[in-house]
Image (spheres, rainbow, N blue to C red):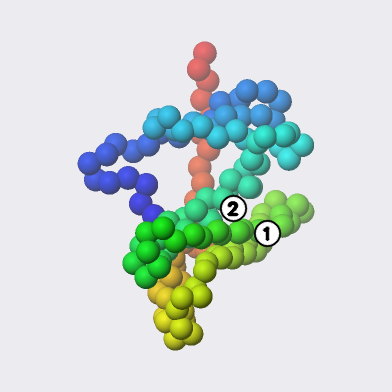
Amino acid sequence: MADQTPDTPPTELWVERTGTRRYTGRSSRGAEVLIGSDTVEGVFTPGELLKIALAACSGMSSDFPLSRRLGDDYDATIKVSGAADRENEVYPHLEEELILDLSELDADAQQRLLTLVERSVDKVCTVGRTLKTGTKVSLTITSDA
C-alpha cells in the first residue's frame, strides 16, 4: 500500500527512548505507539509491530475488492503469527488468516472473491512484498553533541 499520495510530503517516523527497553514510536501525523520488550505490559515488541504491519497491509490491500462484494460495512479480522528463530534472529515463517463472513455467497462466488483478494494482496501489499523479497537496511549513527 502506498504510504503517501504525490501531493503529500513523506511522513516522518522516529522512536524516542522512554526507559529501559522502552520506546515510543511517533509519526509527523501525530500517531504514537508504545514499544518495548515482551516483559513490559502495554507495549508492542518490534516483532509484533512487524506482524501487525503485515496483517494491516493485507487488510488494506483487500479492502476494495471485499467492500465491493460484501458492502462497506463488512467485518474482517486478520490474525498473524509466526515464532522467531532466536538462533538467527529472524521470523522464518509468518502466517496470516483472514476471517470473513462469506455465508451470503455461493461456493463459486466465494472462490472467485478469495482469488481476487489473494491477487490484490500479492500485487499491492508493500509490507508483504518487501518481506517476501527482502530489503537492504542501512544504519547511520550520528552525534547530536
Where residue 104 sits in the image (x, y, percent)?
46, 76
The residue located at (51%, 75%) in the rendering is 103
Estimate how packed mark 1 is, as few (under 14), some (14 to 19) or many (20 or more) residues with alpha carbons within 10 Å.
some
Dot 2 lies on which element?
A: helix
Q: Residue 132 versus residue 65: which sits nearer the camera?
A: 65
Q: Is residue 47 left or right of residue 115?
A: right
Local packing at callout 2 (Cα closer than 10 Å; few below 14, some 14-19, many 20+) is many
Indicate the secondary structure of the residue bearing disc 1: loop
The residue to which callout 1 is attached is 82
Name the spot of residue 36 as percent of width and height, x first. Answer: 67, 35
Between 85 and 128, the one lying in front of the other is: 128
Residue at 46%, 72% in the rendered image: 118
Residue 124 visible in the snapshot: no
Residue 97 sits in quarter: bottom right
Residue hosting label 2: 51
Report the side of 38 relative to 78 (left or right).
right
Q: Horizontal and vertical percent for residue 64? A: 36, 62
Label 2 vs 1, first from the N-terminus: 2
Marks 2 and 1 sit apart, C-alpha to C-alpha, by 8 Å
Residue 78 lies, with reference to residue 113, above or below; the image says above
Residue 15: where, in percent of width, then height?
A: 54, 30
Rendering quarter of residue 122: bottom left
Mark 2–mark 1 CB contact (< 8 Å): yes
Task: Depth check: give the residue in front, 84 or 55.
Answer: 55
Which three-letter amino acid code belongs to the residue tagged 2?
Answer: Lys
Q: Is residue 43 above or below residue 66?
A: above
The residue under the point 29% across, 36% down is 9
Query: Is 18 drawn above or below residue 29 in the view shown?
Result: above
In depth, the one of 47 and 102 nearer the eye is 102
**Could you tell me the amino acid type at mark 1?**
Gly
